[in-house]
């Protein structure tokens, strides 16, 4: 018998045995890591990630959820610019395809975060975003610095009320509340993230100054001329004129109509209130060419793996802010010096550069996680469909790296605007 298959079989068996033990033991999540991953340890974390009491998806619901999500992208989940997507480039950028995702964005985004939230925490941290990074700066230091930059530009301090637009599980919110002392209310469409995020806020003793609400940033509390998605209930709340400042961190890229989204933010701000953020965009001024099949394939690969209707340009972001009633004070790519000798590229952690603490983010780490997930699904510890989710995230990581290397995409287009 060939030694390699025998070792692989033994490895799967041992992994399965350990995971069954860890699952029975009852591994639980906690917020003690702050910005760092909430899951500790490679194998026991895998069990927690894929079998946890907080999940709103039943075991039978994962496959249906990923299939419904994949349908909005023409069944192309798992493809990327280097494995066939280039030959089909443009199909997902067609007006019909984009409209389909715009109309189904609530299902698309909610299903996406039901499926990937634990993968993000496990492989990244509780702050689901990228950041410009200097030489000598760790990954997590750069993440926090990007968040603190927003605190500084927005003048956040004790007594200031801030709105976090698309807050995820609240990693940035908690960091920014601790740093600034401001009171922050976050909103996310995903019920699972609200449950987990508020649990983390309570664990860190931040419940009085950081809180998550389930809602839709296209229709914030007190909205008019809109319709709430199923399951969302604001219980009569009206946020009109409630906040001093607002921010979004790589969140409104999910919006099907940025003008509507930004208009809702403006409504919830006091007169003269500031709104700042980091937006995902393609960069025509840096060379992105909508007629270049490879560029389009990279763009579509990023959209597939991140729940996006379509990526905007910087000009479209500025235009939407102005149409929503903001005066745009400043806007620029925070990664404009991405390949300077003094900086570490924002995509570096996805491109194979490895540290002990950042192993899960690397290509090798992602491959190990995918193998682990495959074994878990084979052993029926992980729900059916989990491997599909892992494959999708691995594929989009490749296109994020390619977009960053060619400087045709940035996840950190910074803007700051004042409500007129």
Image (cartoon, rainbow, N blue to C red):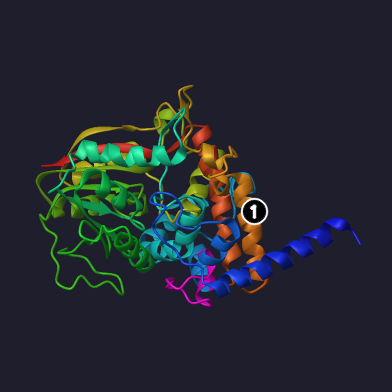
The residue under the point 40% across, 28% down is: 336
| Boundaries of the magenta span | 49-63
Q: Position of residue 338 (x, y in %)?
A: 45, 29
Count of marks, rendered view: 1
325 w.r.t. 135: above or below: below
23 w.r.t. 29: above or below: below
The residue under the point 38% across, 67% down is: 192
132 w.r.t. 267: above or below: above
- Asked whether residue 54 is drawn in magenta, I would say yes
Quarter location, residue 398:
top right
The residue carrying mark 1 is 368
Instruction: Locate the C terminus by quadrant.
Output: top left
The residue under the point 40% across, 32% down is: 335
Left or right: where does residue 181 sit relative to residue 315? left
Instruction: Locate the N terminus by quadrant.
Output: bottom right
Nearer to the camera, 419 or 318: 419
Q: Position of residue 365 (x, y in %)?
A: 61, 49
Q: Position of residue 74 (x, y in %)?
A: 53, 60
Left or right: where does residue 294 sit relative to residue 315? right
Nearer to the camera, 256 or 109: 109
Quarter location, residue 47:
bottom right
Residue 411 visible to the viewer: no
- Asked whether residue 312 is drawn in magenta, I would say no
Dominant secondary-structure state across the stretch colored magenta:
loop
* Helix, strand or loop for disc 1: helix
Nearer to the camera, 135 or 109: 135
């Amino acid at each position: 018998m060939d030694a390699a298959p025998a070792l692989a079989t033994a490895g799967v068996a041992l992994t399965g045995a350990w995971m069954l033990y860890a699952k029975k033991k009852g591994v639980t999540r906690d917020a003690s890591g702050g910005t760092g991953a909430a899951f500790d340890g490679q194998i026991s974390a895998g069990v927690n990630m894929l079998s946890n009491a907080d999940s709103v998806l039943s075991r039978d619901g994962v496959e249906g959820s990923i299939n419904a999500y994949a349908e909005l992208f023409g069944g192309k989940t798992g493809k990327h610019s280097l494995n066939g997507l280039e030959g089909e480039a443009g199909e997902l950028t067609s007006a019909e395809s984009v409209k389909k995702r715009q109309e189904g964005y609530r299902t698309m985004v909610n299903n996406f975060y039901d499926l990937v939230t634990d993968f993000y925490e496990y492989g990244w941290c509780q702050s689901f975003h990228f950041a410009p990074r200097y030489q000598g700066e760790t990954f997590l230091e750069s993440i926090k610095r990007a968040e603190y930059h927003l605190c500084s530009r927005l003048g956040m301090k004790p007594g200031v009320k801030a709105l976090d637009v698309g807050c995820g599980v609240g990693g940035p919110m908690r960091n920014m509340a601790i740093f600034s002392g401001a009171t922050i209310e976050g909103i996310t469409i995903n019920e699972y993230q609200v449950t987990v995020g508020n649990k983390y806020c309570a664990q860190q003793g931040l419940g009085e100054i950081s809180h998550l609400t389930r809602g839709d940033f296209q229709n914030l509390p007190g909205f008019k001329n809109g319709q709430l998605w199923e399951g969302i209930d604001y219980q009569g709340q009206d946020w009109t004129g409630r906040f001093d400042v607002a921010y979004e961190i790589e969140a409104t890229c999910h919006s099907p109509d940025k003008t509507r989204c930004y208009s809702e933010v403006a409504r919830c701000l006091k007169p003269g209130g500031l709104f700042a953020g980091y937006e995902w965009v393609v960069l025509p001024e840096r060379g992105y060419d909508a007629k270049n099949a490879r560029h389009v394939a990279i763009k579509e690969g990023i959209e597939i793996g991140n729940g996006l209707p379509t990526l905007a340009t910087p000009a479209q972001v500025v235009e939407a802010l102005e149409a929503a009633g903001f005066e745009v004070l400043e806007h620029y790519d925070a990664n404009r010096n991405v390949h300077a000798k003094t900086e570490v590229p924002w995509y570096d952690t996805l491109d194979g550069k490895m540290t002990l603490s950042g192993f899960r983010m690397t290509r090798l780490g992602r491959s190990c996680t995918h193998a682990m997930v495959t074994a878990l699904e084979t052993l029926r510890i992980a729900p059916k469909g989990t491997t599909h989710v892992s494959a999708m995230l691995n594929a989009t990581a490749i296109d994020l790296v390619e977009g960053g290397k060619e400087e045709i995409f940035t996840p950190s287009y910074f803007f700051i605007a004042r409500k007129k």
